[in-house]
Image: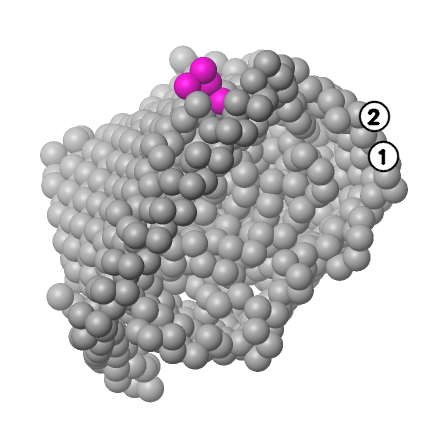
Amino acid sequence: MEVFGNMPDRFSSCKIIIVILVFVTLSFSQLYSLAENSTKDDIQAEIKLEQEKLSKDMDEEKKEDEKSIQGVEKLPDITVIGQLQRIEYTVTRSSTATKTDTPVLVVPQTIMVVSKDLLEDRSAMNLHDVWQNIAGAYASLGEGYGNVINFRGFSSAHNLSQSTLYNGLRGGRGYFTIAPNLYNVDRVDVLKGPASIYGTTMPGGVANIISKKPQSISDNFLRLRKGSFDQLLTQIHSSGPTQKKNLFYLFDIGYEKSPKLHDNMDKQNVQFTSSLAWVLRDSTRFDFESGLLRIRRKSVPSHGVPIVNGDPFALPGTFNFTEPTDLTNMTNYYAEVHLNHKFADFLNLNMGMRAGNSNNDTTYHIMSGTPAADGTLKRGYSESSGEETPFSSDINITWNIDVAKILKNKVVFGSDFTSGKIKSSSISATEGVPSINVFKPVYGQANPKTYKYGSPSKLSAKDMRYGIYLQDEIELLSRTHVLLGMHAEKFSLDVNDLVKNQKFSEDDDAITLRGGLVYELIKDNLSVFASYSEGYEPQFFDRVMLPTQKGSPWAPEESWQVESGLKGSWKNNLNATISWFSIEKTNILDTDPVDKTLYRTIGAAESSGVEINIIGRPIANLNISLNYSNLYKAEVTKDTDPTQVGTRLYGTYKHQFSTWFRYDFRQLGIGFGTYYINGRPPVTPMTGGSAVELPDYWLFNTAIYYTFSRNLKLQLNIENLLNEKYLSGVRPTQGAPRNYSLSVTTGL
């Protein structure tokens, strides 16, 4: 297997040291544990006899208590809305970073969590709404591509990596897979930097979308929402116990009609989720979840805004260059199974599998160039369809090994597997597409049946990944925590051009390592951490076939990160993290500067920055979320074209700042937040023309909450309170103007 040899020399020995430390620690721990077992057997036998006697006495007392309350009427199930009592933004434990339930305070990488309560307070409906609450994160692409994310300066677009996990498992690749709505999302965890334990991931981080689980207490509600620009939402949620005391269910269905921000635009979606939890004693839990999401988009522009005389705001934000007949139909369904079994207090088994299918059929007009002086804008036309069938699985064993009272080990050994099939076809018009006047648009004159078309494109692809991983979480003398891990992976990809009858294949393997150290300056309250982690990403299937002077296949992108910082936690009510990081990524694919019809790997790019995150409840009745990111370096560092060295990475920023505050006065609550971004480099529109400056902007948002009773809540959210004009995304698009949404939630 190939161990990354292109990393800096100062880290070349780090990998060997990490591997040696892992096995030395495990060997020493196991030998010591075996030696102790011989002296502990007699003591444990006596303890067991005492426990059995005590348990027998308690059972007899319980029977007497049950006899004394016979004839008393059973209390009805409690009906709740969302949460039972107070609002909680803070999440103190997560399994996203280590695949074990671990306090965030002792994980040597930055983890940011957006809780269910924060999502509901912000009236968040999709992944685009989540990223404003995460320092250094935003959606790279526009409408319908919320799972194509930019973390710490690097985007997940155009590679085979998935930047989004679902309950710790991989979903689709973001190419045809639809970003889900948040009806059934409990929280979103974001692990910053290469997530080495998952194998193929983007260098900036990975998001783990964690769904709501069936509960033992009845939770039934109806939510209705009406908003600006004809927005409409209906959600029905039900969860609770079944007639069998160890079987619990969850059912969630939602319908949304999105705001009509552009002329002729109409977007509707329906999402259905159901799940069951089967709890056997206290040692085994089985979870099954399935879902269906259907989206119908009519005349939704997704390739930016026309630039008139260099001014992206020259046209009204409602202008639409597409036709009323342009249509996209997307369907995504999945099934997911999880099993957790506890063999003993020190040994635990976790298994998970996820399978799905996504398809996308689209017809759309697209801008071609920039408008002429009289407003004439040339357009193109394309039709495309695609289908993706992903599958992923993960199985691991967690083994707790304690050596006396000074050294504790939590060892995870596991295997993961991912496969996927993709089919895609497209065809584009070459003649006959009518222009449109941006100043006086007239719709309905386009007729795709009269267009002349070029040669169609039809591709099929299949990929598979096999991985094994080993990790050890070490606790030494209560305050020192060491994390050591490795992931070995083999990857294969086969692509078939069905039109040209050409086949392309690629296979590779890699070992990625990570190591980290945490020291608790104040036990359970303040820690300092440092870490090193590696990642790699095979090129996306449609890029394997790109022409090159050296031929295919392309080498995978490789990355590494160093990070250090401070973490704080106060009474489990308030969490804070301040971190510094530096990431390098190599083998980035780009067009050849001499011959634009060819491609080459540009060498390396680097991003460095500082992030601050504060979230929780500093005082009674006040919940806050503050995030700041300073990406002071995000540029090309090595390139075959010297003029490109020092160029700012596409779609990045220098400063990003967001806040959200909620204060409650008994039944009344008030929310207020801001979002600021600056230092974005100019971007060249996809349709050509001069680069467009992306101005800085501030957004101010507010909300009012009123709880009439446990079964009735009212919520008003106002976004972009000052009606700021701004551009968002790497395809410059005018952001939404001032808008509101009014929600009513009632118990059922």
Q: Locate the C terminus by quadrant.
A: top right
Discs 2, 1 touching: Cβ within 8 Å: yes
Give the SS element for disc 1: loop
Q: Which residue is mark 1?
A: 667
Q: Nearer the viewer, residue 78 or 699?
A: 78
Q: Report whether 118 appears left or right of 501.
A: right
Q: Quadrant of residue 432?
A: top left
* Residue at (20% x, 43% y) in the render: 463
Q: Is residue 471 visible?
A: no
Q: Which residue is mark 2?
A: 708
Q: How many marks?
A: 2
Residue ID at (80%, 25%): 709
The furthest residue to the bottom: 10
Label 1 environment density (alpha carbons within 10 Å; few <14, some 14–19, many ≥20)? few
Q: Amino acid at mark 2?
A: Phe
127 within the magenta span: no
What x and y, as percent, mark residue 210? 47, 41
